């Protein structure tokens, strides 16, 4: 079976993927029957080998290909003016090979293409994959965050008043992963005994994670290793999970690259905020200052580095805490 999961709602997309992994049964066996491939370096031989491998002590296995189709998307800021990047001869041959192979995918294999962004309708994925294999995960608009929070809380077995949900949305914004973590804290605080109230939110919810990530990136840009490590551990001690931090750090460096490129094109800060769909102007202002500490080439290298670290932690090749410590130390020394 073939699946294409795409869209900007990373949280729900991850939940969906976790459900598929849970269907493999015992976590230890699930790990043995899961293969993750980097779509940016994908070749047909590696893909077919992974898909043709028989499940080990199970009836199914999962092959995940990350961000293969996303590379055929135009840069987000210029998508309204630019067409998709020209597909190289090698990629065209790979896509053709996929078309020929996918109808023969073993019944024991679930092949999941996992894209971290929304694919536009002209992406070659939609001409290559079955239409019923596609599922888009769209983050709620800012105006719908309160309702999303209420529904998410209900799914967790708790309740939150509309006023509290709106306040939480105002404090945290559309960072769904952080919102989900705040909901967990609030549920623990009320011990599932009553609905979360406006006062509960104001006492417990915090936007300091976002502020401290800015401080961490500042320290990295200035090569202040001790300060960067201190900010990292303050974030961890405040309750931020390693995977959430890695996502936030990657997000901030991606914003830095985007604003740097747009600044070179003389795009105004207000237009940057609209193009990047960022709710708070201060994030653009801070990012423009931070971007001065990095060259475009270094930002691209850092994002590549972050992708490798994320891959290593997801596949269990490296402990998340150790990976974060090493990453910050190396970035400050690079």
Image (spheres, rainbow, N blue to C red):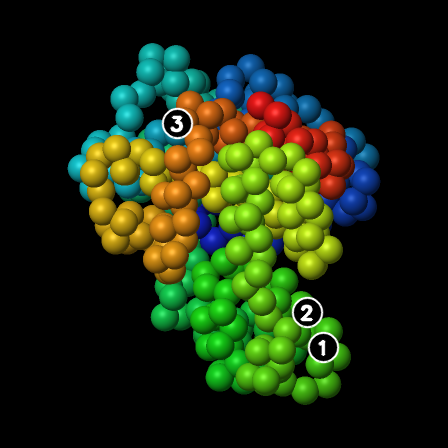
Q: Earlier in the sequence, mark 1 or mark 3?
A: 1
| Left or right: 101 as drawn, with respect to 194 | left
Residue at 52% x, 73% y: name it: 168
Labelled pair 1, 2 in contact (Cβ < 8 Å): yes
- Image coords of residue 162 (percent x, y): 49, 83
Q: In the rendered image, which quarter is residue 139 located in?
A: bottom left
Give the residue pinned by disc 2.
Answer: 185
Can residue 102 be seen here? The reply is: no
Mark 2, Cα crowd under 10 Å, few <14 / some 14-19 / many 20+, is some
Quarter of the figure that contains the C terminus: top right
Determine whether 268 is above or below 334 in the image.
Answer: below
Q: Which mark is residue 189?
A: 1
Labelled pair 3, 2 in contact (Cβ < 8 Å): no
Q: Which mark is residue 125?
A: none
Q: CA distance from mark 1 to mark 3?
A: 44 Å
As helix, strand or loop, the secondary structure at mark 3 comes to helix
Q: CA distance from mark 1 to mark 2?
A: 6 Å
Residue at 66% x, 53% y: name it: 235
Give the residue pinned by disc 3.
Answer: 296
Q: In front: 153, or 189?
A: 189
Determine whether 196 is above or below 303 in the image.
Answer: below
Nearer to us: label 1 or label 3: 3
Q: In the rendered image, which quarter is residue 51 located in?
A: top right
């Amino acid at each position: 079976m073939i699946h294409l999961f795409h869209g900007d709602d990373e949280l729900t997309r991850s939940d969906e993927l976790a459900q598929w992994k849970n269907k493999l049964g015992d976590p230890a066996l699930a790990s043995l029957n899961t293969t993750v491939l980097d779509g940016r370096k994908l070749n047909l031989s590696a893909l077919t080998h992974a898909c043709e491998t028989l499940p080990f002590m199970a009836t199914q296995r999962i092959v995940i290909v990350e961000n293969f189709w996303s590379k055929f998307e135009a840069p987000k800021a210029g998508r309204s003016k630019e067409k998709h990047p020209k597909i190289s001869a090698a990629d065209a041959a790979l896509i053709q090979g996929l078309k020929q192979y996918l109808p023969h995918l073993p019944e024991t294999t679930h092949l999941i293409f996992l894209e971290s962004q929304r694919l536009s309708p002209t992406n070659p994925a939609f001409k290559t994959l079955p239409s019923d294999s596609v599922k888009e995960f769209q983050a709620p608009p800012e105006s719908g965050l309160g309702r999303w929070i209420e529904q998410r809380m209900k799914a967790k077995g708790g309740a939150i008043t509309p006023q509290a949900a709106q306040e939480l949305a105002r404090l945290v914004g559309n960072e769904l992963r952080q919102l989900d973590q705040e909901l967990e804290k609030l549920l623990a605080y009320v011990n599932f005994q009553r609905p979360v109230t406006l006062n509960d939110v104001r006492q417990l919810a915090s936007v300091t994670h976002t502020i401290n990530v800015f401080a961490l990136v500042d320290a990295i840009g200035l090569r202040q290793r001790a300060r960067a490590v201190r900010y990292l551990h303050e974030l961890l001690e405040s309750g931020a999970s390693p995977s959430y931090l890695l996502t936030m750090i990657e997000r901030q460096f991606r914003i830095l690259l985007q604003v740097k490129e747009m600044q070179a094109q003389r795009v105004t800060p207000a237009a940057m905020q609209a193009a990047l769909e960022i709710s708070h102007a201060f994030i653009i202002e801070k990012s423009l200052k931070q971007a001065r500490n990095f060259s475009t080439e270094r930002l691209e290298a850092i994002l590549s580095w972050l992708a490798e670290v994320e891959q290593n932690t997801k596949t269990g090749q490296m402990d998340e805490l150790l990976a974060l410590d090493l990453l910050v130390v190396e970035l400050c020394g690079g």
